[in-house]
Image: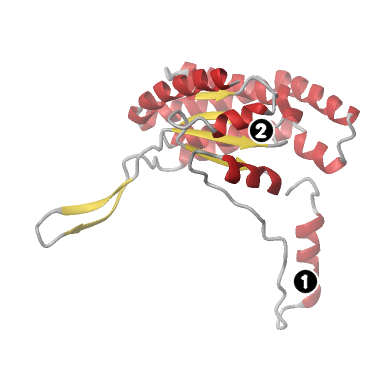
Amino acid sequence: MQQLIQTLGQQARQAARQLARAETAVKNKALEAIAQALLDGAEEIIAANTRDLDAGKAVGLDAAMLDRLSIDAVRIAAMAEGVRQIIALPDPVGAISDMNYRPSGIQLGKMRVPIGVIGIIYESRPNVTVDAAVLCLKSGNAAILRGGSEAAHSNRALAACIQNGLRKAGLPETAVQLIPTTDREAVGAMLRARGLIDVIIPRGGKSLTERVANESLIPVIKHLDGICHVYIDDTADIQKALKVAINAKTHRYGVC
């Protein structure tokens, strides 16, 4: 497993150097190609997702988990629209801020530059494959993705669309790599890949985040506990506030 992660990491580092120099237009071309590939590949994505849903039902996943796992034409369209929203954002690479002159005459400021290779570990939501990949791409970073085993077929189908878009824009397919195994040891191998992965981002439940924080030899960008309470002020319209609070917590149980 460590050899697999080493190979992916070396490929990602090579790709990251090319991405860091990529013009905004090239990155946006890749993003548009990814959005279109998602739409064009909807049938294959849904077929792959059906395999995951069938497997999930067979092992007794609850309704909320199945909802998080599910992909349909509407959700694919939403993914593609999300990619196009990223295209519309300004390119963060090279942005300069907080410029000032020191008494010596030296001008100091901050410039935003890519991090390099970002490892992202997440659970059952296959849409995170797309979200994580395109945010890394826009910011000039390579990505190594490790999704949940329950979404393995869906993630592979989505990753194929992403790599198709990269290829069409002339960028290396290895800029976004999905770990091709559901072996849990892959997570541990990623957390030990110091020198190959620059930062790890966990996206999932508390146990995943705690494991990553405790075991990683690499810097981690993490959350832990979400905000799950609602405060209603005594001056609020209580009936309106109750409707808002109940809707926020019960509209869609699959949202965490």
From this view, report whether residue 207 is shown above or below residue 77.
below
Does label 1 or label 2 sit earlier along the sequence?
Answer: 2
Element marked by disc 1: helix
Graded by Cα atoms within 10 Å as few (under 14), some (14 to 19) or many (20 or more), the crowding at tag 1 reads few
Q: Residues within 10 Å of mark 2 (few under 14, many from 20)?
A: some
Give the residue displayed 36% in from the left and 26% down from the top: 17
Look at mark 2 in the image and give the residue it sits on. Answer: 77
Classify the position of the N terminus by image quarter. top right
Pick the residue in front: 77 or 20: 20
Q: Amino acid at mark 2?
A: Ala
Residue sitting at x 88%, y 30%: 59
The one nearer the camera, 247 or 18, is 18
| Circle 1: residue type | Lys
Cα–Cα gap, marks 1 and 2: 32 Å
Res 86 visible? yes
Q: Which residue is mark 1?
A: 240
The image shows residue 109, relative to residue 3, as above or below, that is: below
Across and down, in percent, residue 206 comes to 69, 49
Residue at the image position 42 percent from the left and 17 percent from the top: 170
Residue 216 % position (x, y): 55, 39
